[in-house]
Image (spheres, rainbow, N blue to C red):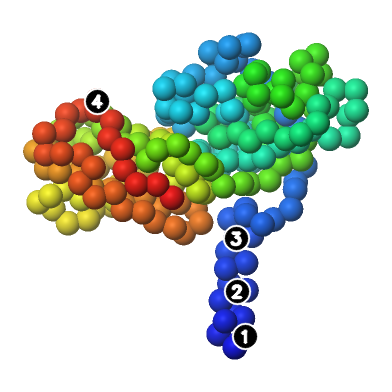
Amino acid sequence: MNFLGICLVVFLTMSKTIHGYGGGWSNAHATFYGGGDASGTMGGACGYGNLYSQGYGTNTAALSTALFKNGLTCGACFELKCVNDARWCLSGSIIVTATNFCPPNSAGGWCNPPSQHFDLSQPVFQHLARYKAGIVPVLYRRVACRKTGGIRFTINGHSYFNLVLITNVGGAGDVVSVSIKGSRTGWQPMSRNWGQNWQSNSYLNGQALSFKVTTSDGRSIISSNVAPPNWAFGQTFHGGQF
């Protein structure tokens, strides 16, 4: 292999490690919330709303401050396994998507900075450990998100205030930038409003809409003309996928 090829391999390896792929396991703890049917996990600080209809189901987690990073981690996927507690741990591992924030002084204080903590939905916690455990030590690592179907764009707001909720993102899962393009405009950057709700103040009514989504691993995907010119607020459209 020539020098350029070696440098490329090293760069790609470093990129995967930087963004959580190919790295080792880290220590944390896990609790649960939301009830046996996980109804208490709906909504949340990432803005996903009904986690069932959005495709996330019960394999979800609220993250402590150190992991949530002011919402930048929304949509990221983690693999967890229970360790060092033979009385309560179950074998195997689980994969969850970050959909909510576990604020300080909740979950018995386990979400206080600088703790690395996952407050899981009760159903998925019970695949990790026995219910009566309450809290268990875990190992966790970032993994790629595997989603069915394309990225979903739900357009809310009103004229001159287009608020687009982006869900069902595969790959890295956590969106770091979004651009929007009308059929009569160029590409325009959107700003993060909250969670995974992205905002544009342009007048885009009556135009077909395209979106460019970039995730934390630096990959981007363009979904061209996913919304037709007669789109309406409150509708959801499906684009490409990582």
Asked if 219 appears above or below 119 in the picture, the reply is below
Would you say the residues marked 3 and 1 are in contact, meaning their CB atoms lie under 8 Å apart?
Answer: no
**Mark identifier at residue 234:** 4
Residue at image location 54% in from the left, 43% down from the top: 145
**Mark identifier at residue 54:** none
Residue 165, picture quadrant: top left
Q: Nearer the viewer, mark 2 or mark 3?
A: 2
Question: The disc labelled 3 sits on which kind of residue?
Answer: Lys
**Mark identifier at residue 1:** 1
Alpha carbon separation for disc pair 3 and 4: 36 Å
Structural crowding at the residue carrying mark 2, measured as other residues with C-alpha within 10 Å and reported as few (<14), some (14–19) or many (≥20): few
Q: For numbered disc 2, what is the local secondary structure?
A: helix
Q: Nearer the viewer, mark 2 or mark 4?
A: 2
Alpha carbon separation for disc pair 2 and 1: 10 Å
Whole-percent x, y for residue 42 in the image: 49, 19
Alpha carbon separation for disc pair 2 and 3: 11 Å
